[in-house]
Amino acid sequence: MNRGRAVPRRTCVGCRVRTAKSDLLRLVVVEDALVPDPRGRLPGRGAHLHPDLECLELAERRRAFPRAFRLPGPLDGSALRARLAERDVQQQDGRTVSDV
C-alpha cells in the first residue's frame, strides 16, 4: 500500500466539478473586479475556475461569483473574460500558454 501524496482538490464555481487544484485558476476580487491569481499569492478569499470561457459563462449565468466571494452585487469579469479569450486564441494557434 504505497500511496502518493494527497493532491489538494477544489471545486470549479462554473461547472461544479471537483478536480486537482493545479488544474484550476484561482480568482480573487480587487475593487469589485475578478482578477486571476495563477500563483495563489494574492490576499483575500479565493474561488477556483477551469481556465476556459465555458466555465466562466456558466458561473456568470448561475451568479456564482458573489456567492463564492460572499459579496453583494455583480462583479466585473470583463478583464478575466478577455484574458481567457486571448488564452483560447493562443491555444488554437498552437502557441504555449504559461499563465492566464
Image (spheres, rainbow, N blue to C red):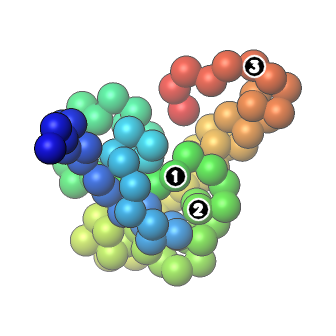
| Residue 25 pos. (x, y %) | 44, 44
Residue 95 numbered tag:
3
State the separation of the CA atoms marked 2 and 3: 22 Å
Amino acid at the residue labelled 3: Arg
Residue 64 lies, with reference to residue 100, above or below; the image says: below
Precedes in sequence: disc 2 or disc 3: 2
Q: Quadrant of residue 85?
A: top right
> Mark 1 touching mark 2, by CB under 8 A?
yes
Which image quarter is the N terminus in? top left
What residue is shown with label 2? 55
> Mark 3 touching mark 1, by CB under 8 A?
no
Precedes in sequence: disc 3 or disc 1: 1
Amino acid at the residue labelled 2: Cys
| Residue 41 pos. (x, y %) | 24, 31
| Residue 71 pos. (x, y %) | 29, 70
Residue 50 numbered tag:
1
Q: Secondary structure at mark 1?
A: loop
Dot 3 crowding, Cα within 10 Å, few <14, some 14–19, many 20+: few
